[in-house]
Image: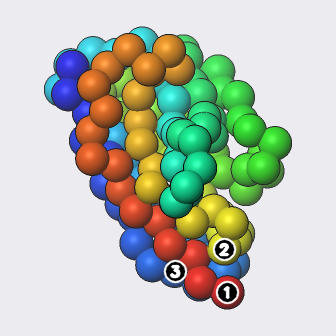
Amino acid sequence: VQLQASGGGLVQAGESLRLSCAASGSVFSMAWFRQAPGKQRDVVATITRSGSATYADAVKGRFTISRDNSKNTVYLQMNSLKPEDTAVYYCNSPFRSYSWGQGTQVTVSS
């Protein structure tokens, strides 16, 4: 399975972005990760195939993960963005089973 993340950009604090992750085939549980410069790649949110979601404490209440199984696509709606959300965002299974794509850069200015 190949994964392609998109939708990143440069926004101001408080604004919103919606990321998309298109998979080349059917996938089961999926997750969004992010990696800021000099830091490790951490999980942001996960979602099962049936739609059950979990979130990192840092994004709880601001980010929403969703999916469209008919399109093999997972989304991350990011609201009330903060400068500390600045990172490259990646999608993968929660177990990092697939090859990492290029990710999509999210930059939040204060």
Q: Residue furthest front?
A: 38
* Residue 106, x across and y down, in percent: 47, 65
| Tag 2: amino acid | Pro
Rounded to the nearest angstrom, the CA distance separating label 2 from label 1 is 6 Å
* Residue 69, x across and y down, in percent: 36, 24
In the rendered view, tell whether residue 54 sits above or below residue 26.
below
* Residue 70, x across and y down, in percent: 29, 25
Q: Quadrant of the C terminus?
A: bottom right
Side of 7 where 101 appears, left or right: left
**In this view, the mark in front (3 or 1):** 1
The figure's colour scheme reads rainbow
In the rendered view, tell whether residue 58 sits above or below residue 3.
below
Mark 3–mark 1 contact, CB under 8 Å? no
Circle 3 residue: 11
Assess disc 1: are there few (<14), some (14-19) or many (≥20) residues with their C-alpha within 10 Å of its C-alpha.
few
Side of 39 where 59 appears, left or right: right
Q: Residue at x 73, y 50 (%)?
A: 59
Res. 70 in view: no
Secondary structure of residue under mark 3: strand
Rounded to the nearest angstrom, the CA distance separating label 3 from label 2 is 9 Å
| Tag 1: amino acid | Ser
Secondary structure of residue under mark 2: helix
Q: Residue at x 57, y 76 (%)?
A: 108
Mark 2–mark 1 contact, CB under 8 Å? yes
Q: Which of pointers 2 and 1 lies earlier in the amino acid sequence?
A: 2
User: How many badges with numbers are in the image?
Assistant: 3
Q: Residue at x 64, y 21 (%)?
A: 52
Circle 1 residue: 110
Q: Which of pointers 3 and 2 lies earlier in the amino acid sequence?
A: 3
Secondary structure of residue under mark 1: loop
| Tag 3: amino acid | Val
Rounded to the nearest angstrom, the CA distance separating label 3 from label 1 is 9 Å
